[in-house]
Image: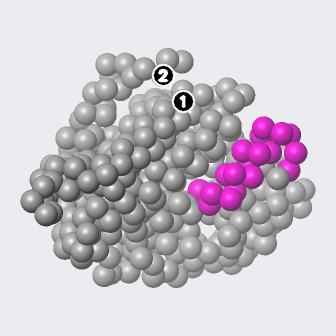
Amino acid sequence: MSILYDEGQQAIATESRRVLDARASKDRLLKLLEQVGEHDAPFWDTAVEQGWTALAVPEEHGGLGLGLVELGLVAQASGAATAGAPFLTPGFGVTHALVAAGNADAAAKYLPQIAAGEARGAVAFAEGTDILPAAPATRFADGKLTGSKPAVPGGLKAELALVWASGANGPVLALAELAGAERKAVSSFDNSRLYADLTFAGTPATVLAEGAAATALAREVLARMAVVTAHEQVGGAEALLHIARDYAVTRKAFGQLIGAFQSVKHRIAEMYGLVEIARANCIHAAASAGTDGFLLAAADARLTATEAYDTCARDCVQIHGGIGVTWEQGLHLHMRRARSLAIEQGNLLFWEDLLVETLTGEAA
């Protein structure tokens, strides 16, 4: 697959940015930080209206049948706008699991709902700091789930959850309707992510994969979600780069533009380098989907995009001096999101270990 965007992909990128530039609201996002259990409903309505929920759903189930490249472009625009609804990326994870598992009944039942935005997805793999535990404490038996999953992104208002559990014959990847689960909201510094502790007490679920097939599919889902998240991180980092540059060429200190000082311009140059390296890795990873090198490419994208977003968030605040830390300036929205995205889909240690394991063939 080419790593150059074609005309249709460029149109998706342009239209996504245009729509979100027109509809994103910093004041709305600031208000969400003071609430627990609410998300940016206008953003989600926009996502459904624009067909972003249907991007990865096959055409026979009411979707557009597109792939990681197109999802990444939308995610990049969402990252720049610090979109306050966490359902697009995990929704894609649920979609991919349904398609790849080959369960025709489950796919026919749920994929049209996901495409139409009627069913929002969450991915509940982690237990503690381990994003994909070898022996999850959550159990699956007789078609039901028992156990709990902490701080699931989007878990508070999602209708479906893809759950990593233990079964009689090893790990199980199961899909549960969250109407049958208990939820407890988790207060965080980025409340619009809708983190929730999920408790399953005999919750009915559908098995999508078991044993070694479940492990392989869970890794694939995680890697694909990581690539989408990496695009979102690049979108946020690029927005901060532009904000920092614009400020540096207009703000004066000691009679000259602050962009003339080495401590500022070198910092902005470093931000530019990090963004472009991460962007290149994201494009390569998206184009590598389905190949033997995909896991390695996904890890590269995840690691470099996390570093780019974290560094740009920190340095942009520094370049703005005292106003960089004020509530009204809003730079903290990116700083909060950079930290949230750095731990969703696995932290840096997980991806570094995966990178080493992929390169050496030995567990890190």
The residue located at (73%, 74%) in the rendering is: 146
Judged left or right of residue 210, residue 226 is: left
Say left or right for 93 vs 243: right
**Frontmost residue, 101 versus 259:** 259
Work out which residue is located at the far left of the displayed protein and give it.
Answer: 255
Q: Please give the range of residues in magenta.
A: 345-363
Q: Position of residue 364 (x, y in %)?
A: 82, 53
> Is 247 rendered above or below residue 196?
above
* Label 1 crowd (10 A; few <14 / some 14-19 / many >=20): many
Secondary structure state at the residue bearing disc 1: helix
Position of residue 48 in the picture relative to residue 3 (left or right): left
Local SS, label 2: loop
Q: Name the residue under label 2.
A: 3
Q: Is the magenta stretch mostly helix, strand or loop?
A: helix
Dot 1 or dot 2: first in sequence order is 2
Q: How crowded is mark 2: few (under 14 residues within 10 Å), some or many (20 or more)?
A: few
Mark 2: which amino acid?
Ile
Does the magenta run of residues contain 251? no
Query: Where does the image place residue 207, in percent across and percent down from the top left?
Result: 72, 53
Residue 61 shows in the view: no
Name the residue: 67% across, 65% down: 126
Residue at left 68%, top 38%?
295
Viewer-nearest residue: 5 or 248: 248
Residue 252: x percent and y percent?
A: 12, 59
Quadrant in the picture for residue 360: top right
Mark 1–mark 2 CB contact (< 8 Å): yes
Closer to the camera in the image, 264 or 348: 264
Q: For residue 284, which numbered disc appears in the image?
A: 1
The residues tagged by marks 1 and 2 sit, at their Cα atoms, a distance apart of 7 Å
- Identify the residue shown where x is 21% and y is 64%: 26
